[in-house]
């Protein structure tokens, strides 16, 4: 039986950003989609949550300085 | 002009066709100059290859020196030779293709699989090296060509440039023929693009001759010409080539032809790379190995690391540094000899004519060295032309004036690991030959005065000077961006001095106070705190308060604080609770926690509340006062400061004997098998742990005893508790007991079989058999202890050596990876393409230098400040 990566304590929360919100996020950041950090489609966590190339992933990490840090990544081939 | 971005760089192999096409001259004679010193046509210095002599024009492009970039020529080789740089690839290709039909030794289907995989990888910019490697290894294992059925014979490659088939040597001609047969499509499976790198081009038939600009000859003082190493090597090649040709035409025996061929191969090989293993390096007449093409590029002094990534500068100086506490932290003492050499350009205009005239007229230090006239001509100012220059002087000239007091210079100590390694200082021209700096700026540079040297650079434009002063001056870097605290602050004597000064019970007469503050700009004394027998006395705390800015309020625990369970605050027995009210030190002693570099809370608070300028003044005053104070009291440290009475000595011996007995008992219990293992440990580990614990405790107790007898007035104890230098552990080792020596955190167990030294029984586990040093440094170690101490000490040395090289390389990689990142106004960190690296700088968007203990707002501090005002 394979364990769910999301359940592991060291794996931060990954979520697919709904299509409607992407526009908003990019606008606040003042960037185009290709200027987001990337994550491979082949990344195990991407396969688990079933994201497709072009999707934007919201990652919520624990941070030493800010407790919670939100990061966005765009899925690439 | 908008900056341009390099989209891609493509490297290709030169084809013979291309070499001939770009060549402007066919070179056939090995001679360079004729008897009149004129370049010989079709020789290596042919004038069509570019110009190196001033005044002449290039015969190809007509450009003068500096305009003409130089042009390539070529040499037609009589017989092909292998290019050493590609020798290995050639061997791999020969072994992976059929010697008969030239096809790849793989089926078309398999080949296409490899090609497809490489194409895919290239598309996403991924590495395809491993695919190529696999293609080679699969193909070279095949015994029979799948296309024509020819059996494949393994080709043996012998370094550097020889190939054997069935012990029969293949000539470069044979090799070239085979490579020619490989079809374009098959090459793609090896990651080779046939249009940019046909394999037969890796066997040279024509050699490009680099332009003369690449290999300039130098004229010696004797008028003799000395040629560049590359020219020498090319002469060799052409000479042998010529001889080869003659012999071949004359129909010389095969043996001689082969010899000459091999010689040509040798010269071409060393021309390309003179450090090939297995080939004796070509040498200059003096015996020095020649610097040929590969040597020009490789290594630290090569083209890439030496000339492109690193450059040399003018207007700089380097010398030994030494301390001068009378300088401001923002100053640097520059030796007058250096100040006379370094210059700053002054642009003459209507408003500074008088000032500039003065420089030209002066015959001593701040004078003009050179003037640059409106027509751009540089004229040296001498006694004879001074008057003449003054008359002609007019706006538009530039006068190069010597460095003088108040100039802004950049001061640097390598390794430049953080931004505080280069700071802007104000010049103070001083006698003698060293750079002088206030010892309080040693921490950011990580400098000491045991022979350290530092560099100094003089910014030449007003813009650069202004920028340096505003952004790089020392006072702007008191707070470190690394941890948000002061990195500039008191060290060593500063801390000891202020500690002695502000201790309880000090009192000074008026003249003593004057003595202390005479170098400090103070114009008013407060009311004396003590009046006795009609005499007035001031406390040390009052004297220190003179340099604190008005309105400063602080409360904190000093370094000497012992962290009692319940803090008695103002009533602290050791006077370790510092209270500052309105710029007045009410309670507490000043030590490392207050003014030390890295810790100094007072400095921290002053920078934040009053700004960098006030902080600089405070630091200047504090260092001067501290030096005065330590001189007032006198402070020394010698070996007899570690003397402890026999009583104490006996107590220490008892403590150690007790611990040794304890160890013996533990070992016996272990041998009997009565030892209870600690959770998660084996019995052996438990024993080691408990022995270490027991001995560690013994050393600490010995230290306590020694410390108790030394008392708080002992110099070493003062330095240790105030944080000036050393620790109580150092003291313990000097006075009481050095303690357990360790390697990798364990007791020493290496050496002979089951024992450390032949003085012990095999398997002995006692304290002294495993490196416990019970002596103190003062009393001296016995021979066995000394040996163990050396063993433990060696580990430290090795660790530092390994750590510095490793962390240095790590730092280099980090810098290369992060150098172009920029913090944008919207708080994101991005690279030059605008790709976001951090969505908020440091996740929280806080600059440590502007934060309070890592937080943007320190609520507690604000409340206290408001309450105090109310």
Image (cartoon, coloured by chain):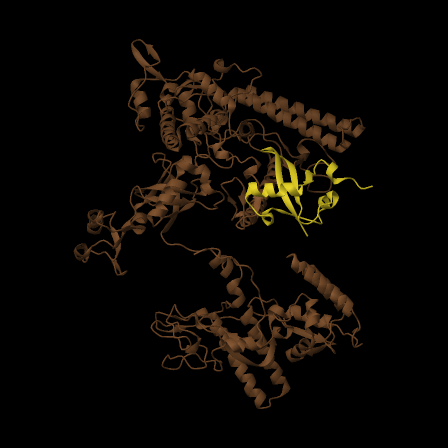
Chain colours: A yellow, B brown
The residue nearer to you, when weighing B571 against B584, is: B584
* Residue B298 pos. (x, y %): 53, 61
Q: Is residue B246 visible?
A: yes
* Residue B160 pos. (x, y %): 63, 70
Please say if B275 is above or below B729: below
The residue nearer to you, when weighing B681 against B185, is: B185
Please say if A67 is above or below B53: above
Quarter of the rendering containing residue B227: bottom left
Please say if A8 is above or below B706: below
Q: Quadrant of the C terminus of chain B?
A: top left
* Residue B824 pos. (x, y %): 50, 43
Q: Residue furthest right?
A: A1
The residue nearer to you, when weighing B135 against B62, is: B62
Q: Is residue B61 left or right of residue B18?
A: left
* Residue B391 pos. (x, y %): 16, 55
Q: Is residue B206 left or right of residue B534?
A: right
Image point (42%, 81%), residue name? B40
Q: Residue furthest top?
A: B533
The tally of labels here is: 0
Q: Residue furthest bottom?
A: B250
Q: Is residue B447 visible?
A: no
Q: Quadrant of the N terminus of chain B?
A: bottom left
């Amino acid at each position: 039986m394979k364990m769910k990566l999301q359940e592991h304590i060291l794996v931060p929360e990954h979520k697919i950003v709904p299509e409607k919100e992407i526009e908003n996020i990019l606008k606040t950041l003042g960037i185009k989609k290709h200027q987001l950090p990337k994550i491979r489609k082949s990344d195990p966590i991407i396969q688990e949550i079933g994201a497709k190339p072009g999707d934007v992933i919201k990652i919520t990490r624990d941070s030493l300085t800010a407790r919670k840090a939100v990061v966005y990544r765009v899925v690439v081939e | 002009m908008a900056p341009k971005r390099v989209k891609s760089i493509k490297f290709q192999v030169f084809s013979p066709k291309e070499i001939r096409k770009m060549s402007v001259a066919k070179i056939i004679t090995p001679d360079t100059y004729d008897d009149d010193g004129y370049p010989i046509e079709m020789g290596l210095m042919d004038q069509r290859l570019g110009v190196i002599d001033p005044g002449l024009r290039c015969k190809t492009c007509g450009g003068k020196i500096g305009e003409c970039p130089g042009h390539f020529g070529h040499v037609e080789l009589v017989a092909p030779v292998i290019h050493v740089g590609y020798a290995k690839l050639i061997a791999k290709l020969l072994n992976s293709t059929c010697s008969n039909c030239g096809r790849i030794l793989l089926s078309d289907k398999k080949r296409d699989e490899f090609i497809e995989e490489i194409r895919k990888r290239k598309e996403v910019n991924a590495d395809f090296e491993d695919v190529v490697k696999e293609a080679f290894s699969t193909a070279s294992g095949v015994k029979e060509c799948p296309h024509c059925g020819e059996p494949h014979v393994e080709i043996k490659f012998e370094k550097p440039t020889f190939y054997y088939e069935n012990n029969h040597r293949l000539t470069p001609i044979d090799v070239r023929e085979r490579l020619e047969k490989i079809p374009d499509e098959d090459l793609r499976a090896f990651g080779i693009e046939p249009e940019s790198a046909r394999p037969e081009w890796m066997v040279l038939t024509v050699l490009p001759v680099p332009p003369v600009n690449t290999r300039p000859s130098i004229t010696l003082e004797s008028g003799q010409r000395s040629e560049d190493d590359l020219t020498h090597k090319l002469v060799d090649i052409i000479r042998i080539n010529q001889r080869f040709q003659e012999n071949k035409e004359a129909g010389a025996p095969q043996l001689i032809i082969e010899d000459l061929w091999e010689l040509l191969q040798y010269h071409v090989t060393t021309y390309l790379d003179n450090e090939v293993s297995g080939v004796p390096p070509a040498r200059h007449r003096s015996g020095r190995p020649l610097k040929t093409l590969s040597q020009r590029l490789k290594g630290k002094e090569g083209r890439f690391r030496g000339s492109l990534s690193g450059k040399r500068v003018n207007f700089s100086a380097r010398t030994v540094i030494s301390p001068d506490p009378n300088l401001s932290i923002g100053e640097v003492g520059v030796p007058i000899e250096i100040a006379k050499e370094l210059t700053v350009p002054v642009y003459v205009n209507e408003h500074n004519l008088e000032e500039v005239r003065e420089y030209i007229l002066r015959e001593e230090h701040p004078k003009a060295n050179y003037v640059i006239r409106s027509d751009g001509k540089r004229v040296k100012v001498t006694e004879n032309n001074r008057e003449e220059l003054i008359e002609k002087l007019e706006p538009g000239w530039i006068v190069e004036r010597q460095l003088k007091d108040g100039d802004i210079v950049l001061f640097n100590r390598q390794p430049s690991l953080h931004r505080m390694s280069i700071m802007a200082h104000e010049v103070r021209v001083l006698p003698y030959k060293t750079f002088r700096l206030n010892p309080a700026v040693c921490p950011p540079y990580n400098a000491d005065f045991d022979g350290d040297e530092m560099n100094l650079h003089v910014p030449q434009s007003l813009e650069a000077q202004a920028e340096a002063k505003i952004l790089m001056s020392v006072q702007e870097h008191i707070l470190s961006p690394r941890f948000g605290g002061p990195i500039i602050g008191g060290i060593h004597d500063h801390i000891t001095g202020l500690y002695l000064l502000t201790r309880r019970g000090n009192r000074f007469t008026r003249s003593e106070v004057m003595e202390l503050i005479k170098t400090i700009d103070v114009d008013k004394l407060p009311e004396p705190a003590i009046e006795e027998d009609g005499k007035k006395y001031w406390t040390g705390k009052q004297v220190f308060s003179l340099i604190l800015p008005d309105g400063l309020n602080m409360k904190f625990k000093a370094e000497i604080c012992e962290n009692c369970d319940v803090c008695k605050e103002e009533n602290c027995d050791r006077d370790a609770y510092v209270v500052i009210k309105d710029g007045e030190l009410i309670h507490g002693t000043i030590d490392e926690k207050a003014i030390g570099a890295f810790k100094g809370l007072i400095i921290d608070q002053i920078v934040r509340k009053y700004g960098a300028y006030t902080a600089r003044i405070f630091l200047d005053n504090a260092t001067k006062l501290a030096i005065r104070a330590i001189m007032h009291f006198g402070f020394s440290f010698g070996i007899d400061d570690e003397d402890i009475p026999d009583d104490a000595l006996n107590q220490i011996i008892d403590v150690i004997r007790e611990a040794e007995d304890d160890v013996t008992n533990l070992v016996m219990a272990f041998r009997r098998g009565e030892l209870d293992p600690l959770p998660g440990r084996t019995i052996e580990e438990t024993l080691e742990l408990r022995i270490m614990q027991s001995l560690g405790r013994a050393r600490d107790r010995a230290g306590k005893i020694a410390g108790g007898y030394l008392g708080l007035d002992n110099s070493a104890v003062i330095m240790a508790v105030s944080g000036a230098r050393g620790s109580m552990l150092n003291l313990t080792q000097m006075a009481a007991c050095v303690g357990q020596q360790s390697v990798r955190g364990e007791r020493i167990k290496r050496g002979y079989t089951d024992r450390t030294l032949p003085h012990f029984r095999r398997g002995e586990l006692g304290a002294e058999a495993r490196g416990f040093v019970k002596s103190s440094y003062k009393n001296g170690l016995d021979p066995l202890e000394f040996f163990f101490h050396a063993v433990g000490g060696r580990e430290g040395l090795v660790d530092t050596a390994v750590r510095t090289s490793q962390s240095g390389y790590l730092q280099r990689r980090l810098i290369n990876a992060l150098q172009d990142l920029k913090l944008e106004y919207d708080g994101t960190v991005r690279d030059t393409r605008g790709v976001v690296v951090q969505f908020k700088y440091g996740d929280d968007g806080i600059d440590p230098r502007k934060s309070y203990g890592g937080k943007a707002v320190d609520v507690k501090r604000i409340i206290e400040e408001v309450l105090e005002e109310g």
